[in-house]
Image (tube, rainbow, N blue to C red):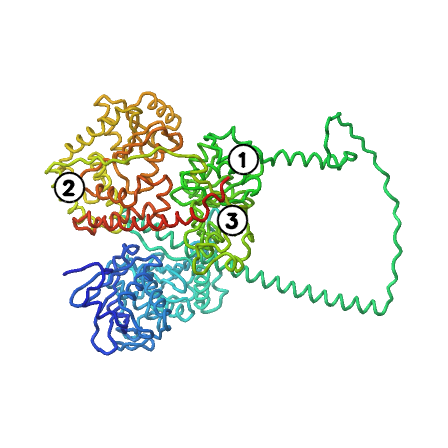
Amino acid sequence: MDQPEFATILNASQSGSAAAPLRLLITLDVADGCFRFEWRKADQAQPIARAQLRPGGAFLSTILALELELELDGRTEQDGCGSRGTLARALTNRLRQRFPVSAGALHANVLSDIDLGPAKAGVPWVVPLPEGDAAWKWLARELQHFIRLLEIMAHSTEEKARGHAAARALASQWLQTSFKPPLGSPPPAFAPSQPAGLQLRVTLHMVRGFIQFDWLQSGRPVATGRVNCVGEQELAWELKVDRRHELTVSSDQPRSIHGSLQAWLDRFPVPPGSLSVSRLVPSASGSRISRIDLPVGDLGSPPWPWLEDEILAMAEAFGDVPCPAPVPEQFDPFLASVLERDRVRLLRKEQKQAEAQARQREAMARLAEERRDRERRADEARKESKARKATETLTPSVPSPAVQRPPLPPVPVHIHLPPLEFQETAFPLSSLRNYQLRERAALWWVSNQSDDLLCLPHCRIERLEFQLRTALRVLGPMRGRALLSDEVGLGKTIEAGLVLKELLTRGMVKRFLVLTTPSLVDQWEEELSDKFGLATSTTNHAEARADWQRFWRESPGLIASLHTLKQPAHLELARQVHWDILIVDEAHYLRSRESQAWQAVSALPRQFLLLLTATPVQNSLEELYNLVTLLQPGQLLSPKEFRARFINPKRPRQPREPEELRRLLAQVMVRNTRANAGLQLPPRRAETVLFEPNDAERAFWQQWETEFRERLAQLNASQASLWGRLLLQAAGSSPAAWREALEKFPDRSAARAWREQAPLEPSWRRKCELLQPLTRGEGGAVIFTQFLRTQSALAESLRAAGIETFVINGATPAPERQPITEEFHRRGGALLLTHSGTEGRNLQFSHCLANFDLPWNPMEIEQRIGRLHRLGQQHPVRIFNFVQAGTLQQHLLEILQEKLNLFELVVGETGLVLGERFSSDEFAEEVLRRWRESEGRVGEAIAGLGEELAAARDAYGEVKKLDETLFEKDYET
């Protein structure tokens, strides 16, 4: 059966049927345990499309909790959704876009196999729905609720049984009835006999939040029941008899609790005198749990209403804590970790929502209390004023005589100063107070002089005049608040580091926070450490992830990503700290005042603020206004005045009064260009080293890619992404890296066959032979590899050829890296580096770079180039990219070179071109997706990605041209 991807665009015949608004009928089929969808035209009785939404695998709920089977024009399409909160909404949005439904044409009913409240067996019961978009939101919420019910019943191995139980529980909630078997229904699957002389022991566990029932006969356990919360307004009643389980679900309403408890007591009748109750509570120290026996005899007879109240109290106390879905021990460890991570994420989300609601309630209560206090004080003031006026009217006021106090005797002060020639004083030094004021003024003047930078002896930087002028201007006239908008590659990071280091040296700053994009966090840590000697904690450190509160509150110097700060829990912690200076890199992400990033930065208490961006304006001058408002509120007038005075509605990028706008911006903005900085780096040239495989190797790679696509289709989404990117990149690196990666591939038999059949050694030898001439040139060659196994195999090959070879990677101790680099500088040869081995390496003395393999992250390639093509480079830089003909790596290199112009962009511009469309992981994921869908036509699939890169490059070119037009030569230091 043909099963195309669900999101495929309809063909002409299908689009004609689905273009007009339709009617949609949704049926919750309790007997079948599924949702049924039928789309009809307004004038037709027969549906044009049908769909069934059934439970997915019991332990794959994170990836495929619900499976959708759509029947349309005689063929079947598949879709589904996972258990994450937004995936059910995404599924309904796809259905809504696929089949547009008229307003008010969405209907729902319940079809039950038994009588449920007002719904009779076999007769559809109409469910009232809200109108408009609210109906679709209701559907998404109910699908998510259905998924949660399925997770509760995950102990059942049969999907239909789980679906039946979950559908019945959901229908009961729709019909506002409790879920219990109706009269006349078959008995439970294991109805035990009712032995006489039963005893019931009830344990109220107030630590873990459940109530346990143990039925005993002569000290021997007969049955065990447990009641716990599984979500808001939901209780799970789990009964275990002879190693078999029964599970029912009820709401937390008293009537529903009474019915469920009575069902247990009917099956296992216990005299009131045979009941014992105990409560488990934490001890005063909290180190252990104590058991307290409760006097059941004093509760009255019968004790069951009291027990129902205890269950209701437990539901109210623990109703917001979700019950985790079970994960079997024999399950795939990788997928189990994914499920556990998603469960923790959902738990944190619900906890944050509960905390936000609690804070809102506390704030409302505090505001109400403050209002009552103000009203009370105002009422008391009115009464006092009225009483005072009445007293003044009755009793004439008599002025009290002034108390004469003798003056204090003068204290003689004698200050003996050494004779000073040309002493200039603003006031005479005739008293101790004048002397102290003079001393304080002198100390302040010394510590705040802006004519020189006291930190320069402690900085390991090349002292460029325009960067020093920028730092002095920020510290002086701009008073530590500035928008640094230098052109890309001129060192905005160095300028911000100089300002930060100088403020620390003068003692004006103790705590600082740097905010940037996730891909630049490590780069900022490296720059501040190597060039300014500043130790920092970052959001990438394991210690920070282990204790976020300590990270935000105790670390004096922090580097965090804007993405992390935007999260409510992190923002709440960061707002509790007063930051002496805040530095925001890539500040163009703050261009919208309504964005979470702008709101988060605006909420942080700070004294000094630096915003760094090469493109302060991308669409409208209002973006510039939003950035300046963070620095100096009111500098550009009010929003209404700014729009009326400076923005032309017909040309929002061109100011009405450019001279006045320049005058105002010059007080908060610095922009250096290459022309005024006098910096001209030598050119760089990129060459592709293409080597052809032999016929046997070409045939093997074609067959392997076909089989590899089939194996990936059998894995879940997370595993397919991981193994697809790993093995495809390893295949383009070296046979050794590819074989090592195959050792852990899930399909061991296929991996073994691939390793035995692969004829890869001839191409490896040709690749190494083509590299050897580069190492014999002046200055040697810096060679980058992505895999450690490739690096070690290449080092062995070069040394066998008699080439001096130096190796640095993540395992190389930090004290040994600089001596290895200096030795390579003196002797030449080959310096082999990995990504983790490049940190802190400035290699501008070499001018030959070889990309032995090609990372799927363009910014990583740019960082490789930036190690050589930087200030201090005296020669043109030659870049050699090694790829095998006819492979995915060749097609990827072509679009990076021809469409993105990666090897011509200034270092730092790649991230601006990719922007928010592609992060490093998203770009690699897009490459893998296009390769999997290509069906052997890899070149055509990757070419489509090239067109997107070309469009992004053109858009960046327009923004760059706009900024050059608005700010060129007007804001230079």
Residue 76: percent from left, percent from top: 18, 63
* Amino acid type of the residue that numbered disc 2 sits on in the rendered structure: Trp
- Residue that mark 2 sits on: 701
Between marks 1 and 2 in the image, the one whose residue lies nearer the viewer? 1
Give 251 or 437, whichever is nearer the viewer.
437
Determine whether label 1 and label 3 are within 8 Å by CB.
no
Give 205 or 578, whichever is nearer the viewer.
578
Disc 3 on helix, strand or loop?
A: helix
Which one is earlier in the sequence, the residue at label 1 or at label 2? 1
- Residue that mark 1 sits on: 502
Give 149 or 499, whichever is nearer the viewer.
499
- Identify the disc placed on residue 662: 3
Between the C-alphas of marks 3 and 2, the distance is 60 Å
User: Which residue is found at the position 30% from the left and 55% from the top?
Assistant: 62
User: Which residue is found at the position 20% from the left and 52% from the top?
Assistant: 933
**Neighbourhood count class around disc 2 (C-alpha, 10 Å): few under 14, some 14–19, many 20 upward:** some
* Amino acid type of the residue that numbered disc 3 sits on in the rendered structure: Arg
Res 649 seen here = yes
Give 452 or 199, whichever is nearer the viewer.
452
Q: Quadrant of residue 234?
A: bottom left
Determine whether label 1 and label 2 are within 8 Å by CB.
no
Q: Is residue 828 above or below residue 121?
A: above
* Amino acid type of the residue that numbered disc 1 sits on in the rendered structure: Glu
Between marks 3 and 2 in the image, the one whose residue lies nearer the viewer? 3
- Residue that sits furthest to the left in the current view: 695
Tell me if 869 is positioned left or right of 768 in this view: right
